[in-house]
Every structure is written in C-alpha cells, then in structure tokens.
Amino acid sequence: EAAEAALLEGLGPDLLGDDLLVRVRAEHSVAELLGAWLAHATERSRLCLLELRGGGEADLYLRGDTDRFVEELRLYLESNPGTSPELEIVGRRSHSRSQELLLELRSDASWHDGRPFTAADVVFSQGFFTRPDSPLPLGAAFDHVESLAAAGPHRLRAALRHAPGSMMESWERLPLLPAHRFEGASDLVLALRAFLLEPLGLGPYRLERRRLDGGVELAAHEAYHRGVPAQRRCRYRRFPSLESVLLSLSGGELDVIEPDERFADWARRHPEAVGSLRDLPRFQHLVAWNLDREPFDRAGVRTALARAFDAAAILRDGPDEFTVPARGLFLAGTPFAAEPMLLPLHDPRGAANLLGREGFELDETDGLRRDAGGRPLSFSLLVNGGNEEHRRIGDALAEQWSGLGIGVEVESAPWQEIVARRLPSREFDAVLLSWALPVSRDLRTLWHSSAAVPGGGSVSGLRDAEVDALVERLHLEEDPASLAETAAALQRSLAALQPCLFLAESGRIVKVRDGAVEVRAPDGTRAEPSEGDGEPRDLLHERPWWTRSDLP
C-alpha cells in the first residue's frame, strides 16, 4: 500500500480519478446482462470505465453523482433473478485515468477456409487500413487510438488518446482481413489484390467459383456463427442479350434481374411477369460550390441558386434506379437522423429577389445579371463526362439557372481527372457529385474546417465555427437524445449556409420473377418490401434479405 500511495503521489491530478467501484457478478454472461441494461439506462453517462473480469464478473467505475445509477442497476438485477446476479459496492478508488478500450470478440466465428477468427485479424486489419497508403484510408476514423494489441485470442486492448462517443462506429466501419492470408507478404498492396481474386470472409456465403460469363456462384458458409442461411446457394450470371434473359426467365431459371433500358421496357409491357423491389436510398447527389471563388463566397447567391432548382423538372426514375428528394446528411434509418433536412423550396421569384439584393441586376439587353461593375454572373459546372445521367442533370440545371439570367457553362471531364486532380486542388467553380450516404455520425472529414485544405475531404472548402462545434459535438456526444438534437442542429446550420446544393437521393430497383422472391428480415421473418418512400423504421428492417419463396 505504501508503494501504491507513493506512485499515486507522483502522478499529476489530471491523470488521476476518484471513482466509485461497483462489482457485478452473474452465473451466465455478465457482458450480455449489463449490455442489455446499458442500452436503455438513463444514468449511463456516470459510467467512465467497464472492465470484464472473465465471463461472470465485471467492474464498473462510476464518476459524479452515482446514487441513481447504482439504484437503477440494483433494481434491474433484482428483476433478472435467473442469472443469480450480485452487486457489490467496493468503494472509492483512485487510479490512473489513462484511457483504455477492451473489446471482446466472438469466439465462434470462423473464416470461409475454416480458420478461426481471432484478435490478430483485427489488429492486422486496423493497422492495414490506417496506413497512409491504404486503399481505404481510415486513419482519421481511428485518430483516437494510440495503439492496439491482442490481449488474448479473442480480446483486444486499445490505448486511447481520447474516448469520443462515436468511437465504436469506427470499429463497425473497419473491413476485416484474415491475417494468415497476408503472412510473409513483402508488398501488402499486391497481396490485397491477390486476396480480392480469391477472397475470404466471415459472412453467411463464401465464394465457390467464378463463372466464365463474368458472374459468380456463392455457397452457404456451413460454420456461419449466426446459423446456416436457409438459401444454400446464390448464383449471379451475366447474360449477353435480352433474349437470353427472357429465355431463362420463362424457364424459371432466373429470379432477380438487374434491369437495363431494354428489359425495363419489356417489363412495362408485361407487368404480369415481373415485379419490382426497391432498395433503401443510399446515394446522395449534390452540387458542391467552391466557397473560395466568387460569387459562391456569398450565402445569398448560394441560397438563390438552390431556390431556382426545380427537382420535379429535373429528377426522374431510371430503369434500375429511383430518386427521392434529399432528406439529410445521413443514411435514413440511422438512430441520430430523426429529423429531415429543411432545404430551400423551389421559388424562382424569391431567387431573383435574392440575387437583386446581392447586387446582381438583370441586363435586359442580353438577359444576363451583372454586378455594379458590369461583370456578368456566370460560372462553370464540372460534371463527370463518362456519366450520362450527370451530363443530363448538368444541362438541366444550367437551363434552369439561365432563366434567372445566370450564365452556366457545363464542363465535362473524365472522372479520374476530377478525383485525382480537380477535387484535391479545388480547381472548379462548381462540381456535380454523387456519394454514398454515411451511416457513421463522424462527419469531420466532410464538413470540419480542418478538412478545408488541399486534398481534404471538404470539397466546398467550408470554414464555419458553428459547424465545427456541431461536428465535434456530434463526434463526442454519448447521450442519444443530445445526439439526435446535435445532428438536427448540424443539418439546420448547413441548410442555412448552403455550401452544397443537395439535389436528391437514389436507390436501386431490381425486377423479380412473379412469385419467385419474398422479403425477409435478417432474423428470417417475412416482411413487406420497402417502396423507397415514407419514413424508414430502422436499418435492420430497411435492408432485408431477399430470398426465394420456395424456402421453408
């Protein structure tokens, strides 16, 4: 005790905590017991550290006013007598406040080649994808992790620089690689390419073979930790012609079709033969303004351009994709995306008045708006020349804005040039983009001022103190109610600033042979398919599994 006291005296007060230690024991998994309670506990913010001591014991370190936490936990344990739980108030503990995260992995998961999934796989994957030259750079997502090491076959210990509320989302985004497939590789990038030709995963299906027509065949992973899927095989084929598709469809050999223009036209003429399934809208389409260039440095001009946008006249459903109005910064169904983003409504007269207040008056001689110095209001809109839909939308936007006296030149460029050169250097006036809506709430790489640098993720170059504060709070917040309000406040702030013109969101459409496919929730229960509109329930139900109807 004397040695411990001397050690503690040598540490600064900022490294010490005076916390209440509460110990919980249970006959079965104490982790599951406490996890179920913490998911809904009103006082969980008092918990600063949870350490599992084997499967039947856990230490909880509490800070601040702990009485209500302890009483709420006691009542919960008493209501679950089947686990024979015990609660012990050990007392105050002064200890180092260095932050660690302990992760317990499933012990029953295995790779498709039969090798067990272990902590070594997670350590390797996290190191691989946080490298500066990683093909999927996740360094920023793990900036809170100082080091990561295996503390056992299925246990990880992470030393943390800080503990943001969103840190678990970083682990959810981490792709997992089998470390044993990369052992001895001198070039990890080349090893990854070889791995992708013969991939291994942990999911319900494994790659059985690649087809000569360019498709693949998947077989059920018999050791899948959540149970073998009812549908044992999935076959993906490529067809050389519409005729071969229709022949396989009529023979009952084809269940789901990713439609092209010709098949979509045939389906419209034969509605009795096929139905449609709509996925969740997962992609967002927007115009990013370069806020360092005139006239986009003025919020009034950006708002006027948004009010001049008539979505109904531009956006349309395609043969394999549907569109809905832009709803927010996050994928619909995420728990913090409770409120839609209130964007400017189509109002061409209001847009014209705004431009007038910004000093751009209409010149009746040539129909262009000019500032007090006679300079016309004009800019270039950069679009992906290889994307037919982007070119169409770019031309339609230019036509709508020209009705307000704005000169717009639509510039097409190869996508590789846009990504590799034009976006990192922000060499554009405005650019039409499409990106996947994020599931994570950590938006620092998109909207924080620190990302408004050459090569940064803030395409528009937004620098705003209020947005910075909201993005940081969103990253750190733990309370669910405060998290939802912060997300809504961030959306309101960006809707007012208009650093981008949010156009729409889109999802995939697939065609299904009549009666061949039904929608089931991931737990196997039958569910109604989403129609891509209305308020989503949650991600679990909005992304169901599609299975053959003849399965049990």
Image (cartoon, rainbow, N blue to C red):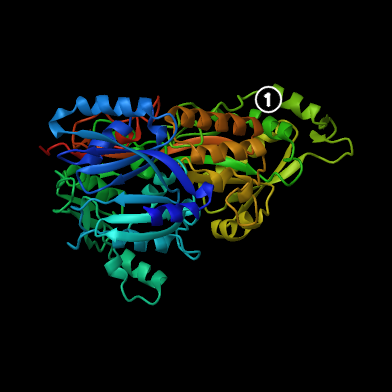
* Picture coordinates of residue 126, whole percent (x, y): 39, 59
Q: How many marks?
A: 1
In the depicted structure, whether residue 487 falls above or below residue 425: above
Q: Is residue 168 left or right of residue 115?
A: right
The residue type indicated by label 1 comes to Pro
Residue 521 is at least partly visible in this image = no
Residue placed furthest toward the right: 373
- How many residues crowd mark 1 within 10 Å: few (<14), some (14–19), many (20+)? many
Judged from the image, the secondary structure of the residue bearing numbered disc 1 is helix
Residue 457 is at least partly visible in this image = yes
* Picture coordinates of residue 286, whole percent (x, y): 56, 40
Closer to the camera in the image, 201 or 18: 18
* Picture coordinates of residue 344, whole percent (x, y): 61, 26
Instruction: Examine the image and state in which quarter residue 508 appears.
Output: top left
* Residue drawn at point x = 53 percent, y = 47 percent: 14
* Residue drawn at point x = 31 percent, y = 60 percent: 150
Q: Quadrant of the C terminus?
A: top left
Closer to the camera in the image, 41 or 231: 41
Disc 1 target residue: 348
* Picture coordinates of residue 13, whole percent (x, y): 52, 47
* Residue drawn at point x = 13 percent, y = 53 percent: 222
In the depicted structure, whether residue 402 falls above or below residue 249: above
* Residue drawn at point x = 56 percent, y = 39 percent: 471
Closer to the camera in the image, 492 or 265: 492
In the depicted structure, whether residue 3 falls above or below residue 360: below
Q: Is residue 326 left or right of residue 289?
A: left
